[in-house]
Amino acid sequence: MSNTKNILMLPGDGIGPEVMNEVKKVIDWSNDKRDTGFKVEEDLVGGACYDAHKVAVTDETMEKAHAADAVLLGAVGGPQYDNDPDMPRNQRPEAGLLRLRKELDLFANLRPALVFDALIDSSSLKPELIRGLDIMIVRELTAGVYFGEPRGEELRDGVRYGLDTQVYNEHEIDRVARVAFELAKKRDNKVTSVEKANVMESGIFWRKIVKEVHDADYSDVELSNMYADNCAMQLVRWPGQFDVIVTDNLFGDLLSDCAAMLTGSLGMLPSASLGTKDPETGKIPSMYEPVHGSAPDIAGQGKANPLATLLSHSMMLRYSFDMIEDADMLDQAVQNVLARGLRTGDIMSDGMTEVSTSGMGDALIEELEKLN
Ligand code: IPM
Ligand code: MG
């Protein structure tokens, strides 16, 4: 019997619970057929948690998240919360996600933008620009303008100001740069560091620290710098020039949405958020989530694409548990269901067969059966 691996599952809001259901099927299958030893505990986050407890995530859930070997999250947010005048700002659904990221110190957010051959026509870019595309965006996730102080509203000489602060210290940049360089070494050995050093002091500083890390420990990796606006433009002009992109929290938020769309469907893209490995236990604090949001417009209708969440589960197998064979098998099963012509609505095209969320999950299990 393999060691037990404790997973905290936080389906959240909107389509979160539906897509997470398909992950549960895969986990049950793998426990049964591959003796993977996953133990799953489920809990609330985001609006679902607010409805039950009037907070976006409870202290008990945070404790469970710290104790778990990995966290799997669906999605948070919905219009009913955006428009609720009584909801305190610091308990809005997104705050639950940000608290998990911050308190687990998940500073490195890995967002791969991978084009699946079978879906090449779903992209708004020409096929020749995106065929075989494989970009890894490494977004800093626990600092920068998302958390910088001071923030809020204040009065200065009778004039109201709204403010956020972009701030990074050297350690925050250093550690995320290292993650990017390490990943590049296993890929095409190229890192593009993105900031706005032409206008932002913190951008000049970002560039300086990335270069220091590079020159000290990664001079064999090719490093270039790019302004964030240019990067957005280059992503749609010639995405193939990129291998690993490392950038701050806010630019990473924007650029990863842009890169996601290159691939044709947000419904296909997974992400991993990783902290620092504990030298004694070897555990890496980690949370895995699809890049797509809660999609309230299609929630509860069985239309959601579960593949991004299933691929997030595969990233968990890879990065948290070093279960490379199982991860490869799951990735292959995803390729196979697409090759069979099965599509959820978001990636549907002529001549393909439209399936529901659970239809997709069931087909995936069939493919896993064949591969096992
Ligand atoms: C993301 C999302 C979040 C972010 C929101 C939901 C807070 O857009 O994960 O990219 O801005 O980080
Ligand atoms: Mg975003």
Image (spheres, helix red, strand yellow):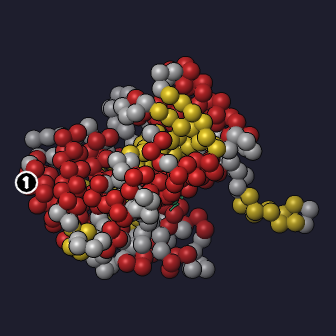
Q: Residue at x 18, y 56 (%)?
A: 336
Quarter of the N terminus within the rendering: top left
Q: Is residue 228 above or below residue 193?
A: below
Return the residue at label 1. Answer: 370
Q: Is mark 1 within 8 Å of ligand 1?
A: no
Count of labels in the image: 1
Q: Secondary structure at mark 1?
A: helix
Give the x, y percent position of residue 96: 49, 61
Q: How many residues crowd mark 1 within 10 Å: few (<14), some (14–19), many (20+)?
A: few
Q: Who is closer to the viewer here, 85 or 127?
A: 127
Q: Residue at x 42, y 72 (%)?
A: 295
Q: Residue at x 54, y 66 (%)?
A: 91
Give the x, y percent position of residue 327: 23, 45
Give the x, y percent position of residue 9: 32, 58
Q: Is residue 147 above or below residue 159?
A: above
**Left or right: 43 in relation to 224:** left
Residue furthest right as drawn = 157
Residue furthest top as drawn = 216
**Left or right: 147 in relation to 50:** right
Q: Is residue 209 above or below residue 48?
A: above
Q: Who is closer to the viewer here, 32 or 218?
A: 218
Q: Is residue 299 visible?
A: yes
Q: Is residue 105 visible?
A: no
**Left or right: 199 in relation to 118:** right
Give the x, y percent position of residue 273: 43, 47
Q: Who is closer to the viewer here, 238 or 169?
A: 238
**Left or right: 128 in relation to 144:** left
Q: Amino acid at mark 1?
A: Lys
Q: Quadrant of residue 308?
A: bottom left
Q: Residue at x 51, y 46 (%)?
A: 139
